[in-house]
Image: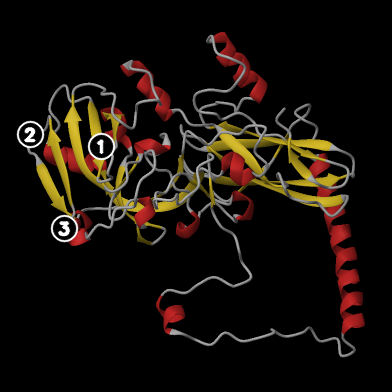
Amino acid sequence: MSSKKTDRREFLKQGAALASAAALGATARSASGQLPGPEAQLPGTDELVAYGKRSRFVDSKRIPHGGRHSPDQFGLDFHIATPLQDSYGVITPSSLHYVGTTRGSFVPDIDPDKHHLMIHGMVDNPLVFTMDELKRLPSVTRLHFIECAGNRANSRHVTVQETHGMTSCAEWTGVLLSTLLEEAGVQEGGDWIIAEGVEEVKGTSSIPMTKAMADCIVCYGMNGEDVRPQQGYPLRLMVPGGEGILNVKWLRRIKVVDQFYMTYNDYGHLRQDPADAALALQIGPKSVITFPSGGQQLPGAGFYEVRGLAWSGQGRVARVEVSTDGGESWFDADIRGEAHPMAHTAFSFNWTWDGEPCELQSRCIDDIGQIQPSRQQAIEFWESEGGRRRVKGQDNSIQPWRVDADGSVHNAIA
């Protein structure tokens, strides 16, 4: 605690010095002491009135992820990563939310007036809902992250967008799936559901009934507007904390069944043992430092606010710790705002860099006591399972960033 207080005092001292330097510079630039005004004015247009647009000076953008270009020569989208290094707070703008696809797909162009959701299988009353009927039902609005199983770092990645850009967090609005299932009347033995989307490959996912009844949401809203086409317009399933592929987009059918089925989406993600299906619900605890992070440049020694994001698929983030010496010692970071269950949580840490080479790390501890492992711990675990020296499964290992003496920041994974 004392070291952080020292950092704050140092920051105040440096802040005063910076203010003095800025004042001297302004005087040198303008004899009147007035700050320059804007170079130009933006006239109003119908486009700006109808929806608005960001400043021409902001160029944050998504990038293709996983070695496949998007779109490809046929117009197919594959994985697209969100620019975490440019994020503020915890909500990812809808236009920058990451995109995950089922082996590449076109985005369906769906007329909501013709779209229906069917609930059937082991139920007493099979139901078919129109979009208007769904929007008449009691709704919830909740903050949740989604993360692709491909969100895993390796030594070839340079930036945090490459290492962790396949996760995003948004405010989702819709009807609790339990409301629909209770209306349909789940029969005894209906222990699983299969959710299906409209996409060309007919991707489906198997989800335990306990999870379906606990907190899953049939979503038509995202960040205060309709779910965007790349995110499943007009309807997508939200499975809080679950692997991204479970959050079926362009949702049109939910079938209640008596067992786990190895579906198209599940193949390659889980083994064919029903007990292993729970592994898809075990994302996190996880965290990553977004500043300073790979590819960024520190101008020199002095005070910096280390910033990042933490999340857990099992509940809330309870604590985040930061190390500036490669994991030798750890200090509590500050949680920024409220930690919501199964949502990104922002953290910060006041750090005075002495200009010497160092390694930054963060680790998350969730509210059931799980601690984010180091890469070595994760590798040793998988070696004990008969694997090679690599992290398999859901990769929630610690991401290290190396800060060199010249201020450049690099991926420190060996």
Q: The C terminus is located in which quarter?
A: top right
Q: Quadrant of residue 275?
A: top left
Nearer to the camera, 145 or 245 = 245
Residue type at tag 1: Ala
Q: Residue 281: x, y in percent?
A: 41, 29
Q: Tell me, for residue 48, which label it has, or none.
A: none
Tag of residue 124: 2
Residue 114 is marked as: 3
Name which quarter of the figure residue 120 lies in: top left
What kind of element bears circle 1? strand
Three-letter amino acid code at the position of disc 3: Lys
Looking at marks 3 and 1 on the same chain, the residue that comes earlier in the sequence is marked by 3
Query: Which label is found at residue 195?
Result: 1
Task: Work out which residue is located at the far bottom of the displayed protein and give it.
Answer: 32
Residue 298 vertical placement versus 357 (above, below): below
Residues tagged 1 and 2 counted as in contact (Cβ below 8 A): no
Any part of residue 323 in sight? no
In the rendered view, does 203 fall on the left or right side of 71? Answer: left
